[in-house]
Image (spheres, grey):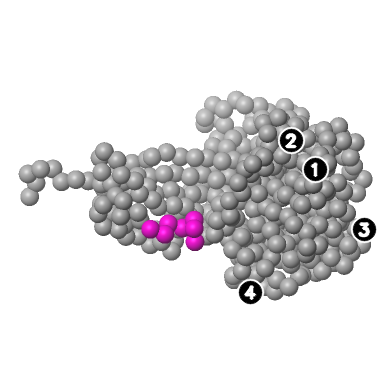
Amino acid sequence: MTSEAHTYLDLHVHSSGGSDDAGGTVEGYLKWIEARRRLGFRIDGFVLTEHRNFDPTRDFSALAAKYNAVVLPGLEVETDIGHVLVYGVTPAFLNHFNLTDVSLPYAEVFKVAWETGGIAVGAHGGRPHIGLVDHVEERAIDLAPISVIEALNGGSSDFENARAHDLATARGLREVGASDSHFVSALGRCLTRFDRRIATVDDLVAALRDPAAQFQAMRLEETVPGAVIPPRPTTAQLLPATSRMGDLGGDALDYDRSVIGKELSAGRLEVTAEAIAAYCSALEETNPLYTDAAFAALGPYGTIIAPPGILQTARLAPPPDPKINFQGTNFMAGSRQEYHLPIRAGDTLEGYASVAQVYEKTGRSGRMVFVVRRNRYINQHGETVATLETSMVMRETKAVEGDA
């Protein structure tokens, strides 16, 4: 690990040795750090925050030293306000809770973590259901036990991160960043820069508990020497504030801005072994990770997984209607798909639909309105599995000369 005054840590990482939905190994993550450093980025280490599982016998200090990094133990539990990260896990904390309980009383988790010498942090604060923002808005929960939240999460959308940042700003909570990585290539997408050397769990807990300590959530690209760290955007900044028609000419675009970024529950997909086999058969898919149980058992996931395309079989309700008042010809402008976690037999995937963005451009053919719709899928553990976006264009229809 570096001896410089600052330490850059990814505080939320899952490994295949401790979380059943993760594919990254500890050494794989360390090799990834080595590769990121060669490109000029800065990552000094990470914290293993396995789901509902803490094994005090796991010690990666020797392996971490080989890569000049730190690997620290942590924990992610599920509470009645969503997921919570715990650092400085002690036997007293473990004896107090049943970690398999997916609805632990949040106030007690934060209180016991503090009283036993550790600290609890609200994970991915802006995500629906498993982040605390929803519970603040809908149930007005007491934030007195909470001092730090994860307001920059590599698996959350920009809007979700902005929701968490807005809450932290409004309620005086401190912010950390982390990747929420389940696979090697996601490590370090977001992390936290501390103003001191962090080499042990005690160092980490001391920094997070100290109101005078300085730490900052940031993205990987902001770790490059000389990089400017911009202010975190707010939800208001991510919503279209103007149609920009002053530049394009014509009337301002009329649509319902209140629906932008709002997710609706849109449907469910039950993934079974039979459904995976039928999908592969229909598409003549032969990848053994999808079709050969014996082969897949020896692979990175330990079992057969579903091809990502199986999500296309889900029948989801449409997102909210932005009621765009614009006449034109519609056509597809493109799509973007991100797959964060494997899909396994037995998974129940909930689909959430939203309109992510409405914006305008002008081209040789005239005025165009782009509508970006997003479908996000979460599994039964509340984890985002995939995000699928499609962009549609409405191109202005001009009257042909001589028309009445």
User: Marks 2 and 3, how far apart in space?
Assistant: 31 Å
The answer to whether one can see residue 103 in this image is: no
Measured Cα–Cα span from mark 1 to mark 4: 42 Å
The amino acid pointed to by label 3 is: Pro
Q: Which residue is mark 3?
A: 91
Q: Which residues are magenta?
A: 236-242
Between 244 and 97, the one nearer to me in the picture: 244
Q: Which residue is mark 1?
A: 4
Check disc 1 and give the amino acid type.
Glu
Residue 33 marker: 2
Contact check, label 2 and label 3, Cβ < 8 Å:
no
Residue 167: name its quadrant.
bottom right
Q: Is residue 144 left or right of residue 241?
A: right
User: Earlier along the polypeptide chain: callout 1 or callout 3?
Assistant: 1
Question: Where does label 4 land, which residue?
Answer: 140
Relative side of 76 to 291, left or right: right
Q: Label 2 to label 4, Cα distance in Å? A: 40 Å
Q: Earlier in the sequence, mark 4 or mark 3?
A: 3
